[in-house]
Amino acid sequence: MAEERRKRTLRMVQCAVFLAMSFVVRIVEQSFPITMGGVNFMKLGLSAPFTLMPAILFGPTYGLIAGALSDLMNLFIPNPVQWIPWLTLTAALKGWMVGLIWKWIKCADYKKVRRGMLVSFSAIGIMGFVNLIVSKFFVNTGYAQIILELNSREKTIPNITTYGFIISALVVFALLFIASKVEEGMGIYSQRRNINNIFLLFMAVLPASIIQTTLNTFILRSMIAQHAEIAFMIYFIPRIAKTLIVGVITVIIINDVLLLLYSKAYPDMYRESMCYNTSRQ
């Protein structure tokens, strides 16, 4: 009983630390924007990895609470945006879903997930390449005008439905290539990071993020008049595209930075959260 109480207290302290780090990142995003290649890099929402860590480490209940608190923290940053309670609920739902999905799939066959990722992001990459060709060489067509309007909607990631799609696909292809080399025993990627976890984390984070973005789109359009005036697909598609790109970045940060550091600081708690079947080694 005392040991379980100690673990619960430690989890709560760690959740508070992750949320505090998330809050710091939000302040930096707003106060000191960092641009890379014309992209407002910090505005991508780099607080998400810290917010989702409690869900991955401790389960859906902790994820739900962390998600709700992370949204409420927006009220305390400089120049806070209008608080919409429904968005707090969707943030809590996302945290709960990530924790629940991770609990279900953390010991799943990662090879099937990798094949699914290859097919999905191949389609995304091809779509980005087609969009790029059409927007460059067939600019007077109706489809090209739609692509240009979609790109103009997202200010954080310029050309999100062209270069954004292509780059996100290339990143996933690079991860797939690295995973294959790890399995061949080349040792170019530390096994302690467990490259295979990254694909299962995609399956935990991306569906929950897509559902949150979809719900938030309906909420914002119903509650803010300026948003409702924009055609639904013109409003929705760039948001989903950004969600996919940010999801890729979030998973990489979680797997290659936060979980790596956590595994060294709290190896026992880390092993409880990950899957250590012999088939995964």
Image (cartoon, rainbow, N blue to C red):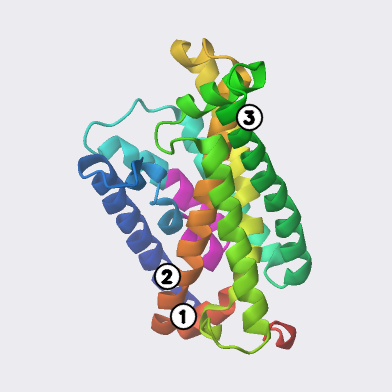
Marks 3/2: CA distance?
Answer: 38 Å
Which of the two labelled residues, at mark 3 and mark 2, occupies the earlier sequence position? 3
Marks 1/3: CA distance?
Answer: 46 Å
Residue 48: give x, y in percent of width and height.
Answer: 44, 51
- Disc 1 and disc 3 in contact, CB within 8 angstroms: no
Which label belongs to residue 25? none
Camera-side residue of 33 and 262: 33
> Which of the 4 image quadrants contains residue 261?
bottom left
Q: Residues within 10 Å of mark 2 (few under 14, many from 20)?
A: few
Which label belongs to residue 263? 1
Tell me the quarter of the image containing the C terminus: bottom right
Q: Which residues are magenta?
A: 52-69
Residue 241: give x, y in percent of width and height.
Answer: 57, 38
Which label belongs to residue 257? 2
At x 43%, y 81%, the residue is 266
At x 44%, y 36%, the residue is 158
